[in-house]
């Protein structure tokens, strides 16, 4: 074997080692990220917001409703309920249409019943209902609504 061929082989071996060395480094980095991934998920861990108690001091007529910024309180045959006004499609604020007896979204026209049931439109989910409690001794003019989420 001539001297030139030995030098070429040496250069090729050196190139292979560098390539394998950089591949090993890449494997170490990827492996390290995979091991670190659970920690990243934990850091991004989000807690649910705490429920908020909102007091409403207004008279609710039998069969009537009270519109608040975050919900509508309805007096139904089954009792008093509070229905979220946040549309389950993209979050626009719903309006209550008395003529249609429906909550209607001004953005894309999703419609919901007084019970929060989806009746039509692009929204796919029903509206959340919030717990309503009547303040003791104040039968129809003071409510506490527990807003969750
Ligand atoms: S945001 Fe209500 S229908 Fe789209």
Image (cartoon, helix red, strand yellow):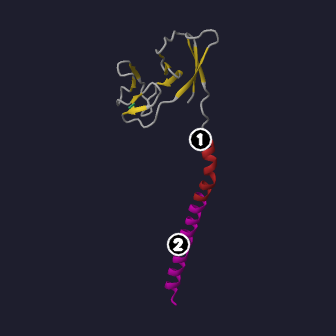
Q: Disc 2, ligand 1: is the CB inside 8 Å?
A: no
SS state under label 1: loop
Which residue sits at x=52%, y=72%?
A: 15
Q: Position of residue 77 (x, y in %)?
A: 50, 20
Magenta stretch contains residue 5: yes
Span colored in magenta: 1-29
Which residue sits at x=47%, y=27%?
A: 115
Ligand 1 - quadrant of the structure image: top left
Question: What's the distance in space between the residues labelled 2 and 1, CA to CA?
Answer: 42 Å
Q: Position of residue 130 (x, y in %)?
A: 55, 25
Q: Please, is residue 46 above or below residue 22 in the view?
A: above
Q: Residues within 10 Å of mark 2 (few under 14, many from 20)?
A: few
> Front-most of 98 and 71?
98
**76 relative to 51 in the view: left or right:** left
Total count of labels: 2
Q: Position of residue 63 (x, y in %)?
A: 47, 15
- Give the labeled residue for mark 1: 44
Q: Residues within 10 Å of mark 1 (few under 14, many from 20)?
A: few
Which residue sits at x=52%, y=86%?
A: 3
Q: Please, is residue 86 above or below residue 9 in the view?
A: above
Q: Main secondary structure of the magenta part?
A: helix
Q: Disc 1, ligand 1: is the CB inside 8 Å?
A: no
Magenta stretch contains residue 31: no
- Give the labeled residue for mark 2: 15
Badge 2 or badge 1: first in the primary sequence: 2
Q: Are marks 2 and 1 in contact (CB under 8 Å)?
A: no
> Front-most of 81 and 5?
81
């Amino acid at each position: 074997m001539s001297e030139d061929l030995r030098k070429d082989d040496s250069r090729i071996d050196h190139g292979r080692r560098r390539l394998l060395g950089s591949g090993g480094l890449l494997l170490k980095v990827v492996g390290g990220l995979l091991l670190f991934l659970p920690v990243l998920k934990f850091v991004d861990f989000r807690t649910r917001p705490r429920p908020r108690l909102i007091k409403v001091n207004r008279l609710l007529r039998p069969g009537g409703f009270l519109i608040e910024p975050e919900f509508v309180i309805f007096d139904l045959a089954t009792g008093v309920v509070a229905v979220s006004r946040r549309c389950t499609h993209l979050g626009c604020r719903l309006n209550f249409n008395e003529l249609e007896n429906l909550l209607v979204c001004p953005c894309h026209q999703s419609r919901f019943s007084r019970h929060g049931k989806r009746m039509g439109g692009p929204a796919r989910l029903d509206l959340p209902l919030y717990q309503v409690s009547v303040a003791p001794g104040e039968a129809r003019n003071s409510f506490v609504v527990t807003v969750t989420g």
